[in-house]
Image: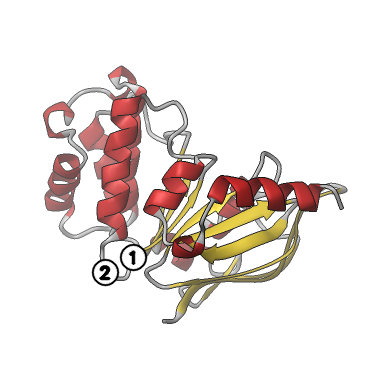
Amino acid sequence: MSAIIETVDLVKSFGFLPVLRGLNLRVERGQFVALLGPNGSGKSTLMRLLAGLARPTAGVIRVGGWELPGEAAAVRRQIGLVSHKALLYETLTARENLRFFARLYSLPDADERIDAMLTQVGLKRRAHDLVRTFSRGMLQRLSIARALLHQPDVLLFDEPYTGLDQSAAFMLDGLLSATGNDAGRTIIMATHQLDRAARLAERVIILSRGDIAHDSPTAELDDLPAIYTRVTSMVTAR
């Protein structure tokens, strides 16, 4: 397999505070990677860097052969981002939100794609309702529809379960499983939920203090909570 995401000696600092410390990462095309780590370990910072929403202090980031930040426009066309923040326009309807993003990507078959995505995420009946009337779970469904609308090669999920009730969380499980089975589509999901990471992803990466503390296939993990506790404690104690 070929790498679709690669970072080399990636550093990100905020003033004198280092968040990522020379991180080297390689993600193969089609992988579903769970990104774990305690608060402050650098998960969200790494996701923002991969999405082209922040600039690295040093190092190299490549997505699909394009380099960030210089080729950010090309990278963004390959990426769909879902986070705990909906990033939607509350004064627009669900359909209007998707139409707005379709125009950004100049999608030629926008109406067909919008209909298909609203159906896939279970929002077809609420297509003409204002987003400000949506529950947290419905907002997340629409965020996923928006992220998938332009059929990106890479999906970035940054703490997507935050604030979801059990029903909405199960819905997201199903969408992630279905999306992860799409041929060639790569997923990186940053989460605190170890059980879902072990169940959904094929590879687990644990960050601690801005670097990779553990990286292995999920199938080789006998006890993820124990490994997580051990490696994060070890790195913290240095």
Residue displayed at 32% across by 58% down: 180
Amino acid at the residue labelled 1: Arg
The single residue placed furthest to the front in the displayed view is 222
Going 17% across and 31% down the picture, which residue do you hit?
A: 127
Task: Return the x and y of residue 15 as percentages of the image width and height.
Answer: 84, 47
- Residue that mark 1 sits on: 185
**Quadrant in which the N terminus is drawn:** bottom left
In the image, residue 179 sits, relative to residue 114, either above or below, namely below
Quadrant housing residue 125: top left
Separation of disc 1 and disc 2 at Cα? 6 Å
Q: Crowding at label 2, few (<14), some or many (≥20) Cα neighbours within 10 Å?
A: few
Q: Quadrant of residue 80?
A: bottom left
**Relative side of 65 to 227, left or right:** left
Q: Which residue is mark 2?
A: 183
| Vertical arrangement, residue 205 with respect to residue 124, above or below | below
Dividing the picture into quadrants, the one containing residue 91 is: top left
Could you tell me which residue is drawn at 30 percent across and 35 percent down? Answer: 170
Is residue 100 at all visible to an observer of this figure?
no
Viewer-proximal residue among 34 and 160: 34
Q: Residue furthest bottom?
A: 1
Q: Residue at x 44, y 81 (%)?
A: 2
Say if mark 1 contacts mark 2, CB within 8 Å: yes
Q: Position of residue 138 (x, y in %)?
A: 29, 28
Q: How many marks?
A: 2
Q: Is residue 157 left or right of residue 238?
A: left
